[in-house]
Image (cartoon, rainbow, N blue to C red):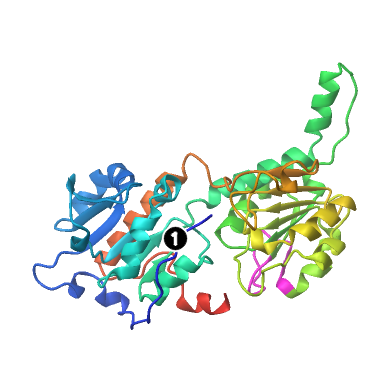
Amino acid sequence: MDFPLPTRGSRPRVPEAAALGSATRTSGNALQILMSKAAYDRVADRLLPMARGVDLITTDALGGFNRGGDLIADEDVDPEVFWISLDLWRSGGLPALFSKIATGTRGRWAQSFAAGVDHPSFRAVVDKGLRLTNSDAQAPAIAEYVVAQAFSLLHPIEQQLAAQASKQWRQIDFREISSTRWLLIGFGAIGQQIANRLQPFRPRIAAVRRQAIRDDRLTDVCTLNDVGRLLPHTDVVVLACALNSDTRDLAGPAFFESLKPGSILINVGRGELMDEAALRLGLERDQPARAVLDVFRSEPLSPEAWLWTHPKIRVTAHASNAGDKVMGRGDDLFLQNLRLYLAGQPLVNEVPATNFEAQ
């Protein structure tokens, strides 16, 4: 996905969590929150009783700023809190909000709809001195996407439909999910939600995580250094990890040469995790036999891209998070974190500044 790039500046000292509530504002200087008009309309009935006296500013795809439905001057907008909600991305309204993060003087905290924070816009937010919290609201939807896509490829649905179309009464054997092996490269919110949905089917599930900490849902836990030993034995490989200097081009020539012939590869992480040219060569060898791609090195995917028409690839438009409950979970998370912020308590899903050192 594409974000506007705010101007990066020097990084001031970030105040301690306990000092970030009302104590940071002088008398008569109300806490100002900037969010989309659509987000405000969804949560106003819960937000207003919780944040009495807060100066609520809204924006939309046109980039104007409103208070209580009235247009206000640009110079009157200097928020302390920013809600970078999913609807702003979908509507094209992100530039106005990010410009205020870049030029503002009072910013302290930004809540993002995104799980990944590898885009330079988010680094610029942290460099500006704001605390950044990301979202796991989309994780259940992405997990369902992964499982549905994989199951539909593991089971011979396409062959069954072909037999129906040709009126052939024949049995088509299939492999049961319990006999498959899965490798989840990334075991954050998305990876864990995938494992939760797979558990009732009892496949063997291995996961790559930063530290090889055991988990009852997993039959094997490893780090990135161990991926090579698992790939030759894995039926479904899912890329769901963060993009950083360790994972960029992770799925390169050696990765595909190690894949089990006949396997399935699903990428819901970032397009830069995978070398697309190496994928093309791998598909020729059935390493993997099929690929499901929701993210790409360049988005939107060019109409001329070979990926659209390759018979072994399924393409979706960065839409694995398009579940009907995602927006509501994002609303709930922002309100929960706002309540914590006002109380000077630790925030949920706060991204450590050290995460950006590895990018």
Compared to 211, does 215 lie above or below? above
Q: Which residues are magenta?
A: 208-224
Left or right of 30 in this view: 125:
right
Left or right of 317 in this view: 255:
right
What type is the residue that disc 1 sits on? Pro
Dividing the image into 4 quarters, which one contains the C terminus?
Answer: bottom right
Along the line of sight, which residue is nearer the eye, 67 or 42?
A: 67
Image location (x, y in percent) of residue 124: 43, 71
Compared to 12, does 269 lie above or below? above
Image location (x, y in percent) of residue 296: 65, 54
Q: Residue furthest top?
A: 167
Q: Using the rendered image of the protein, determine whether residue 216 is visible from the camera's viewpoint.
A: no
Determine the main secondary structure of the stretch shown in magenta.
loop
Image location (x, y in percent) of residue 25: 17, 72
What is the quadrant of residue 95 in the picture? bottom left
Residue marked by disc 1: 4
Residue 212 highlighted magenta (yes or no): yes
Q: Using the rendered image of the protein, determine whether residue 71 is visible from the camera's viewpoint.
A: yes
Residue shown at the point (18%, 58%) measured from the top left: 54
Residue 232 highlighted magenta (yes or no): no
Looking at the rendered structure, the secondary structure element under dot 1 is loop
